[in-house]
Amino acid sequence: MSLELLDGGAAMAEAAIAAGCRFFTGYPMSPFTGLLEEMSRRLPAAGGVCLNAESEIEGVNMTLGAAAAGARAATGSCGQGIALMQEAIAEAALNETPFVVFNLARNQQDYFQATRGGGWGDYRTITLAPKDVPEAVEHTQLLFHLADKHRAPVMLYGDPLLAQTRVGVDVQPRDFGPLPAKDWVLDGTGGGTGRSRQIWTWAMGKANDPGPGPDGHWRAIADKFDRIAAEEQRHEESMVDDAETVVVAFGTAAKFVEHVVAGLRAEGHRIGWFRPVTLWPFPGAALRRATTGARNVLVFELNAGQMLDDVRIHAADRDAVRFVGGVSIAESGLSYGPLLDAPAIRERILGGAT
Amino acid sequence: MIIDTSGPPVLPAKQVADFKPSLLLGEHSLCPGCGEPVALRILLEVLQELDIVQRTIGVVGHGCYGSFVRIMDVDVLQCLHGRAPACATGIKRVRPGVAVFTLQGDGDMANEGLQEVLHAAARGENITCVMLNNGVFGDTGGQQTATTVLGQRTKTSIDGRDPELHGYPIPVADLVASLRGSAYVARGAVSTAAGVLQAKRMLRKAFQTQLDGAGFSLVEILTMCPTGWFVPTAEGPTYQQGTMEQTYGIGELVTR
Ligand SMILES: Cc1ncc(C[n+]2csc(CCOP(=O)(O)OP(=O)(O)O)c2C)c(N)n1
Ligand code: SF4
Ligand SMILES: [Mg+2]
């Protein structure tokens, strides 16, 4: 194993290329910009294409096109840019075009945006929230696999620390197992054969080979997302078995929480932590187990309380759930404020536990 | 059977009328007198005549022509309203050996997706965009689009398009022609038999431009929409000649 010192953007770019990504688009927006620059530098050498799209709307639709034609493809942005992409992310979920969206956000205030979506129709977006750069390298590769496995657009939800921190990482192609054949892609060879292919959210099919239509197709999509919800939940937890207090956090904030909780445990507090790795599907059953018997289920996230909803839905005792996070934004608006700090988090946790 | 349509028919007219490109899988469901099925027919004929049927991908937008994805025996992506040139870009970049075209309307291209087509043209993207311009949102029942000509009555400009209130129509082909990346740009019309043949030649040149790797190509085709214009079916062609064809003009704007 050889470690290379890379910032998050470069590490995710290397990981995407190792996963076979050969088409990438983006429109600059901090902190996503670094990944775009790294892809434009690195992807051509790997035989791929990186376009600085003229807008997020064009970028995501270019990526949808490349994916429809069979390439492993990705795009990304943050905040407002992701908002512009959501019409197409929903479209891709409903017409089953797989690609990866790097949502490198400025903070944790886009949890609802990532997990609830703002597109249209009955769709879901598999969303992984790595806690640090090495995990982002793994998740990047896993996401390309999950996209192809389920024929769906998927998302990595990161933040400025993930995008910009320099870490020694080892980017090796990973094997996540066999995938279904991509026998649905548009390669242009179907014309005139009577078996030409079609990618269409309404799935009406062709006159000589009718499809299920919107009713049948969208029911099937809903069933698929139910299956994904059951199969793909991921989480991490520690010291929850005897815990009176369980702190729930995701992404970068979870890494800080782990550190603070380990310190409190060493001081004799009966405390543990729980981290959803997939924000959707939310690891609800695991959270229920982890919080059974806990008097305090504290939610620490750097927003006004968004994952809080999911924790309330799934915690063993809804009345034990309390919010100890908050909005905390740097003066620049581009990153976190003072609440993302171990002493501040420790104070919130001690104040929230009864 | 391939019929040479570059000159007057040698076969009796009835036989020609019965002819259908073999790429048509079924009947269209559009209004009588609609110009869009005529445009579809010449588009499919061109794919056959250029012998690129089995290396072509179409990207179709949202309008009455959207239902053509069911009857075209061509690999197609039905995309979001206005986004076809962006999707086509992604397809072409990963499959440069395939001929990629978009099929869009004026609402799709000049309203919802104007920036998509302009950026694709400026990039010199090696794709062919086909715009069926009838100057209305036909599919949603005949409302004003960005290409509705002055004076045209629509459901959202019921007293006629008034520049004071609604501004001026956008000549898409002219806009696209002004961009360096455009290698072939033309505007045709299907209101006469000669116009249909001319529009078909334009489509053939546009695809040939793409096959030659010369850059972006666009053909804007003026198509009758008697329903959306509130005119009797049979009057569609003459109405179009007196209105849209006067405003926009027919011919080639860029040939390289
Ligand atoms: C984002 C979005 N907005 C609105 C619509 C509704 N819509 C469907 S077809 C259409 C009109 C398209 O007009 P045009 O492209 O000119 O096609 P025509 O029907 O005239 O052939 C509209 C507005 C849509 N499908 N998507
Ligand atoms: S509404 Fe207009 S464009 Fe649509 S099918 Fe009827 S005539 Fe054609
Ligand atoms: Mg129209």
Image: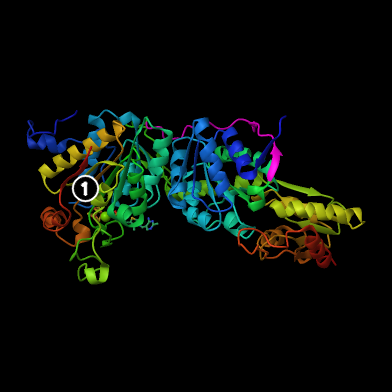
Q: Residue B174's x, y, as percent?
A: 23, 51
Give yes or no for residue A134 being in the magenta stretch.
Answer: no
* Left or right position of A201 against B131: right
Task: Kindly identify the amino acid type of the residue bearing the numbered disc 1.
Answer: Ile
- Quick one: A232 or A47, which is closer to the camera? A47
Quadrant of the image containing the N terminus of chain B: top left
Q: Residue A176's x, y, as percent?
A: 64, 33
Report the coloring of the rendering: rainbow
Quick check: can you spot residue B110? yes
Our reading of the magenta stretch's main secondary structure is loop
- Quick one: B169 or B226, which is closer to the camera? B169
Pointer 1 local density, CA inside 10 Å: few below 14, some 14–19, many at least 20: many
User: Dividing the image into four equal quarters, which quarter contains ligand 1?
Assistant: bottom left
Q: Residue at x 42, y 40 (%)?
A: B90
* Left or right position of B87 against B44: right
* Left or right position of A343 against A285: right
Tell me which chain the residue with mark 1 is part of: B
Q: Residue at x 8, y 33 (%)?
A: B9
Q: Residue at x 20, y 39 (%)?
A: B202
- Quick one: A78 or A233, which is closer to the camera? A78
**The magenta stretch spans which residues?**
A166-188
Residue farthest to the right, as pictured: A268
Quadrant of the image containing the C terminus of chain B: top left
Quick check: can you spot residue A159? no
**Does the closest atom of ligand 1 sit within 8 Å of the Cβ of label 1?**
no
Q: Residue A235's x, y, as percent?
A: 72, 47
* Residue corresponding to mark 1: B221
Q: Residue A200's x, y, as percent?
A: 41, 45
Q: Residue at x 34, y 30 (%)?
A: B55
- Quick one: A102 or B152, which is closer to the camera? A102
